[in-house]
Amino acid sequence: MNERLQAWVAVLRQLPQLPPQRWRRWRQGGERDEEVQERLLLLCADRLIDPVAGREEPLAEGSAEAVARAARRLLPGDRLQVALALPGDEFFALALDMPGLSAEQLHDAVRLQLPDLLPGVEQPMALRVLPPASPGGRVLALWLDDERAESLFHAFEERGLFLAALAPRPALIPPATGHRWRCEAEGDFLTCVEWSAGRPVRWLGCARGDLEQPALRDQWREALVGEALAGEGQDAEPEMLEGEAAWSGARNAETPLRFVPRAASLRTEAARRHRLRRRQLIVAAVTAGLFLGVWGLLAGRMAYFESKLERLKVDAREASRLRAETVGIETRLAPVRDFPDQDVAGVIKLLNARIPRDSWIERLQIDGGVVELEGYSPDPAGLVAALAETPRFEEVAFSRATRGSSGRQQGDRFGIRFRLAGVDVAGYLQEHLPVER
């Protein structure tokens, strides 16, 4: 019983030993039972690339179904989460001046202004908003077609892959040291991202054909070079990359501009709730097991103490019986045990010491603490006085008149009676033998 209880207690003690944040997430169902690996895939115009494994699959088209089939060929394993990095031409971005708003307020404010910011866009759009990197800076808003995100998620799901996130490929890798802008060219589209304090702060994108117009080319150049010249120690020229050089350093989709498809959020929340319910059941089962263990232990101890109490009652009854028998025996032996000790030998020694040599005892009787002497002495009165001086003898007196001797006996015949001190025969008779008394 004790071992089972200790095992339950050990399980409960392990739970609070988790780090505070992890323990909080565990109670809220926010951690997976097993660590699920997330793999980054890069979508290019004509291929899908796994940068970690160094493999790629060609694409005839960029539809959701084609991308999902290529991803399944690249990732044949189970329990994989996929983060898909999309090219820059699938996003819309604006840098906005919106001072005085918190991060939560910024998202709602930008969403409400969508018809004014992107006129003519009627389809649902997924939105990511980055607060300013520094006071007085601009807010970076990035949009992605929501239908595109959902179609990609469901296409991946049909092939056994969980599309956990969509990320802008140009925002995965910061520019080289000394540059503020990193430009990525693919096909007919050019995307440039400005970085500050290790995060994207501005996004520019346009078709290369548009840059053939002098006016647009000058505006583009001014936007890039003019901003770069404003930073001390920064190269005025942006970092221009194209092809494999643009994405070769990407290994994960950790970026603040990461999008999570609505369906993925719902599945993640459903999985979290499922884990939460299961963990609540585990905690309830552990609590119930602990309760039952404690109850069983208490019941066992109660039964043990009840049996011990019953044995003590039996022993108490036996002790009472033995005590009663002992009292009865002591009561029966009391007359013998309490009979006064007259110490006859001691009395004779005292008499031998007190009676002179010219006197002798003819008869000695000790009965009930009373001593009677008869004998002859030249001085009976002196003998009485000598015996009276003995502390052991009390009430010393003649028991009869003295008379002269006759015949061969010398001296007067006497009879003396006295009591032995401390010998209460009358009290003994009254206590133990009242009938006989």
Image (tube, grey):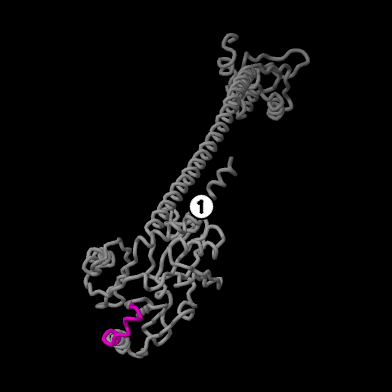
Position of residue 405 relative to residue 299, above or below, is above
Residue at the farthest right position: 408
Of the pair 29 and 322, the residue shown nearer to us: 29
Secondary structure at badge 1 equals helix
Mark 1: give few (<14), some (14-19) or many (20+) Cα within 10 Å.
few
Give the tally of numbered discs: 1
Asked if residue 168 is among those painted magenta in the image, a careful observer would answer no
Q: Residue at x 53, y 50 (%)?
A: 11
Asked if residue 209 is among those painted magenta in the image, a careful observer would answer yes
Q: Amino acid at mark 1?
A: Arg
Q: Place residue 316 in its image quadrant.
A: top right
On the question of residue 360 being in view, the answer is yes
SS majority, magenta: helix
The residue that mark 1 highlights is 13
Residue at the farthest top position: 435
Q: Place residue 368 in its image quadrant.
A: top right
On the question of residue 369 being in view, the answer is no
Q: Place residue 399 in its image quadrant.
A: top right
Q: Residue at x 43, y 50 (%)?
A: 276
Position of residue 254 relative to residue 418, above or below, is below
Give, as a single range, the part of the protein colored magenta.
205-217
Q: In the rendering, at what x and y percent does residue 361 appear?
A: 72, 20
Q: In the rendering, at what x and y percent does residue 263 appear?
A: 39, 56
Of the pair 58 and 100, the residue shown nearer to us: 58
Q: In the rendering, at what x and y percent does residue 209 appear?
A: 34, 81
Q: In the rendering, at what x and y percent does residue 159 appear?
A: 50, 57
Left or right relative to 61: residue 312: right
Placement of the N terminus among the 4 image quadrants: top right
Placement of the C terminus among the 4 image quadrants: top right
Of the pair 224 and 393, the residue shown nearer to us: 224
